[in-house]
Amino acid sequence: MAAHRAIMVGTGGIARSWLERFLPPFAGRLDVVAVVDISDAAREAAGNRLGLPAASRFADMDAAFAAVGRLGVDCCIVTTPPSVHRAAALGAMSAGLAVLSEKPIADTWEATVDIYRAAMRTDTKMQVIQNYRYDPNILTMRGVIESGRLGRVRYAVGRFMRDYRLPLSWGAAFRHEIPHTLLIEGAVHHFDQLRHLTGADCLSVSGVDWRPEGADSFRGECDGLYTLRMTGGAMAQYEGSLVAAGRQQGWHGEYYRVECEGGAVVTDGAANDGVGRVWIEEHDTAKGLTETDVPLVAVQYPGHQAMIAQFADWLDGGPAPPTAIADNIQTAALLFAAIEASETNRVVDVAAKVREARGE
């Protein structure tokens, strides 16, 4: 396995978790050797943590990409807010770097298409973080579905509930300020998960997001309800709230239920003190309902770490990961189709948006 050297663009917020928790198991295989941030404090804190010389700490990403040869880097990790993703990804590609980026691909459909087309044109290896696919409970659910025990998938339901009613309670301030914040910063995970669990792509979406009266901690839409028509005949339903005043079903403890021909498979962190529990429900007319707990599968690397391992393998000549941009454009198209559905009160053709991105 080769050693890879990365520029990290963005050193505040989620980047701190990258440096403290996600990347350490891969030291010597994927190392951050340069950092970029417009914030002096964030940049210096990251540089100090990594022990980087002053010449490897940049306030300007263009200057960092111009120094690729001197730095000896071959990849870029993008951990900025979504509004900066286009500049970071396109700059990295222009410098010949592979890209590992936080979700979503970008903050607008136009920027998303620009990045996707650039990656396809330059044959850049770009992976998008969809870390929730690699929670043990989700991998356990997917295993049940793939086993065929319950037959074909009929529909899936996802529910996400978090209480961010206090100002700035959702980490970075931009999340409380941007439009469609539930979708861009939250539901992009859950839409991708519904694709993952059903093993299908979305054909069309309808629904609405809104900011309820009294939800003063947000300027943008923080609640949402959506219906998804999937390939293969399956359907999906999504409910999300950032101002939930009842049962919490939040990060890594979301509720998912996949209804199949022969029963249902369910996970719900709220039903198990935040720890993902998975169970199968099977109904028999004579015997009634049987619930069977499914032991969680063991994973070597959960979440972000699973995706970092996949990215490093890809750079070493291994297979493209499941959330490479060639596939993740499906999740991005669903995200921006949901925004369009909300703004127009129409059913939006997701497959058409994917074809648009591909230039078909």
Image: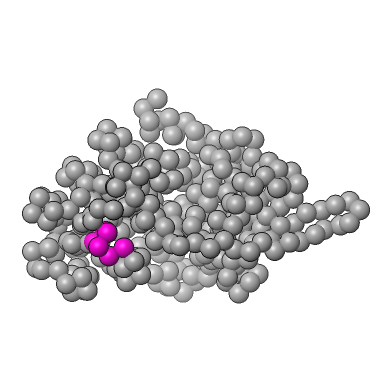
Residue 30 located within the stretch drawn in magenta? yes
Q: Residue at x 66, y 58 (%)?
A: 266
Q: How many marks?
A: 0
Q: Residue at x 86, y 57 (%)?
A: 288
Which residue is at a point 13% across and 53% down the rendered structure image? 72
Q: Quadrant of residue 271?
A: bottom right
Q: Is residue 20 left or right of residue 161?
A: left
Question: Per the image, is 55 magenta?
Answer: no
Taking the view exactly as shown, the residue that stands out farthest to the top is 360
Image: magenta residue range:
26-31
Q: Position of residue 15 (x, y in %)?
A: 30, 65
Give the residue at the far right of this rendering: 286
What colouring does the structure picture have? one colour
* 329 over 45 or under it: above or below: above
Question: Which x, y percent locates residue 66?
Answer: 10, 50
Where is residue 339 shown, x and y percent of the image?
47, 46
Residue 64: x percent and y percent? 13, 55
User: Who's the residue at 35% across and 62% down the image?
Assistant: 174
Residue 184 or residue 5, whichever sits in front = 5
Residue 227 visible, this angle: no
Pick the residue in front: 193 or 167.
Answer: 193
